Amino acid sequence: MEHHFLNLGAGVQSTALYLMSIDGDEPLVPRYDAAIFADVQEEPDDVYKHLDWLDTQGGPPIVRVTRGKLGDAIEAGTDSLGNTCKDGSTWVSIPVFTRMPDGSKSITRRQCTNEYKVRPVEREIRRRLGAAPGRGLPKDIVVHQYMGLSHDEPKRVIRVKQRFLAKPSNWLVHFPLFEMEMTRADCVSYLKKRVPHQVPRSACVFCPFKTDVEWRELRENDAAGWARAVRIDKACRQGQGLDQQRYVHKQCVPLDQADLRPADERSGQKSLLGGFQDECEGYCGN
């Protein structure tokens, strides 16, 4: 028996895959058993409003799962299970920017996607298929998991494929947008005809991979979200055993002190790249 599940991030790409499943026009996009949204409970309000709208479209059931509120774990200095580091230092799950005493800068390892996105989705799939904890899926069951990674994200596709190499042969991963050679821009064009509002980018309000444009929009249009981001940024610098200062903004200064002006305004020179130099891979935001 074969089962089909969509990783629904509620952003541009996965929204396109969800609506394509309803339309039924793409042979690479099936009717899913369910679309699973892993809620870190830290998304902007627009993401939750958009998810509520999707839920009214008569598509596959949208299942919301969560492993808790990510920011609360950061403030408590724990991982998603409440564990603390043995050396007493703060456990920071998000990929924060760091500044060492000698002035050098780096970025920490990203753990939030695996803890708060990947594992909850896979746990829900196993639960729905009746797999006991710690046991493999029955051999007569084939899982097809669909990811909203587009044709302009080849590195992300490779990384996910590598992760799935460790899974049993009856658990498969698919990238319909990549196979259809659809880019994020193509998805945006498709959604303009299907959605009566602008589809937001799915990402925590304090996600370090925001561009300055996105930080400015958060500060100017979402007072609660901005306050939450400033609070979590401060929490990243709390705890014992820190040999580096941690920040959610790449300037390695407190978020409420970061210069969020466009790069050409800060430098006095007009940028020729139109802001694309600030783009990131998006990670969770699909």
Image: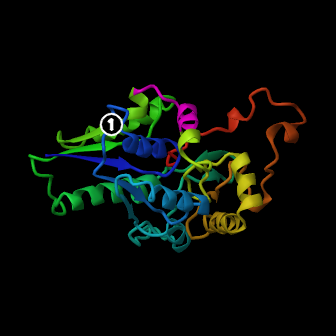
Could you tell whether 96 is left or right of 5 in the image?
A: right
Residue 33 vertical placement versus 170 (above, below): below
Task: Identify the residue at horizontal 37%, vertical 32% (top origin).
Answer: 26
Could you tell whether 284 is left or right of 102 in the image?
A: left
Task: Identify the residue at horizontal 45%, vertical 36% (top origin).
Answer: 156
Task: Identify the residue at horizontal 58%, vertical 63% (top origin).
Answer: 242
Look at mark 1 in the image and give the residue it sits on. 174
Q: Which residues are magenta?
A: 180-190
Could you tell whether 79 is left or right of 246 in the image?
A: left
**Residue 42 in picture, x, y percent from top left:** 55, 64
**Residue 206 in picture, x, y percent from top left:** 62, 59
Three-letter amino acid code of the residue under disc 1:
His
**Residue 74 in picture, x, y percent from top left:** 53, 67
Residue 135 vertical placement versus 227 (above, below): above
Residue 137 vertical placement versus 169 (above, below): below
Quarter of the rendering containing residue 243: bottom right
Is residue 192 a member of the stretch shown in magenta? Answer: no
**Residue 221 in picture, x, y percent from top left:** 74, 60
Q: How many marks?
A: 1
Task: Identify the residue at horizontal 63%, vertical 58% (top origin).
Answer: 246
Quarter of the rendering containing residue 111: bottom left
Element under label 1? strand
Main SS, magenta residues? helix
Q: Nearer the viewer, residue 264 or 33?
A: 33
Is residue 188 a member of the stretch shown in magenta? Answer: yes
Q: How is the image coloured?
A: rainbow
Whether residue 281 appears in this view of the structure is no
Q: Nearer the viewer, residue 30 or 109?
A: 30
Crowdedness near tag 1: few (<14), some (14–19) or many (≥20) residues, C-alpha within 10 Å: some
Whether residue 180 appears in this view of the structure is yes
Could you tell whether 208 is left or right of 138 in the image?
A: right
